[in-house]
Amino acid sequence: MQQNATPGDEPTTPAGDQAEALEPVQEIALTALLAGRPITEAAAVAGCHRSTVYRWLQDDSLFVARLNASRREIADQARAELLALGTAAVAAIRETLENTDAPALRFRAAVKTLELLGLPGEPPAGPTDPLAVEIAWEAAEIDQRGELSRIALLRRLETDPGDGGPMAMLRRALGPGVSPADQAGG
């Protein structure tokens, strides 16, 4: 895990309850990303190169965790505001459904009501703890390595013109000392 903490620094973005603080340049980039700015613009605002921000997004679990936590907090705030409007919205939908003679408007209100029944939905995905971010990255890397080795195996099978049928091709593709049964079990 990359360490970015400086004693005494206080985070300036939402989700400031993280144990470690980001560098000031990271805080600026994070705030810009949370405001919806593209990575290139966030980097320019923070005074760093866009590849630096991309690197933080790929390699800095604290930065990613803070970004995820801040996004979740923003979504939670929006949900709370929508819930506060809920009573008035439900009353307006009810009035439209019950007192409107226009079938098209009633239909749209009914469809929207059905869509809203699926809310509030799940919060934005992604771990908010730096260690959990690193574990997720490691799991994804293991999955990717497994997928890459399956792809390599399939390519070897496709390009191997050898004799002996599919099992012989599979044995040759797997390499010496590995049987197809060993691969099927693992």
Image: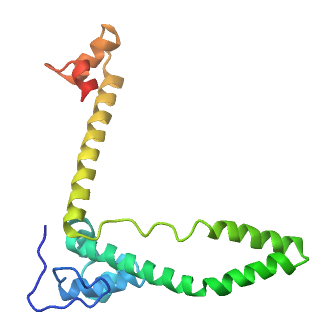
Figure check: 38 above or below 124: below
Residue 51 visible in the picture:
no
Pick the front one: 156 or 37: 37
| Count of number-bearing discs | 0
Left or right for 167, reference 98: left
Task: Identify the residue at the far left of this view.
Answer: 7
Picture quadrant where residue 87 is located: bottom right
Percent position of residue 92, x then y: 74, 84
Which residue does the image show at 82% across and 73% down from the upper left?
Answer: 106
Percent position of residue 151, x then y: 32, 35
Which residue does the image show at 53% across and 71% down from the upper left?
Answer: 120
Picture quadrant where residue 134 is located: bottom left
Task: Identify the residue at the far top of this view.
Answer: 164
Which residue does the image show at 67% across and 87% down from the upper left?
Answer: 88
Q: How is the image coloured?
A: rainbow
Figure check: 154 above or below 34: above
Percent position of residue 66, x then y: 27, 77
Left or right for 76, reference 31: right
Percent position of residue 101, x then y: 91, 77
Residue 69 visible in the picture:
yes
Figure check: 79 above or below 2: below
Pick the front one: 38 or 94: 94
Which residue does the image show at 24% across and 57% down from the upper left?
Answer: 137
Q: Quadrant of the C terminus?
A: top left
Q: Quadrant of the N terminus?
A: bottom left
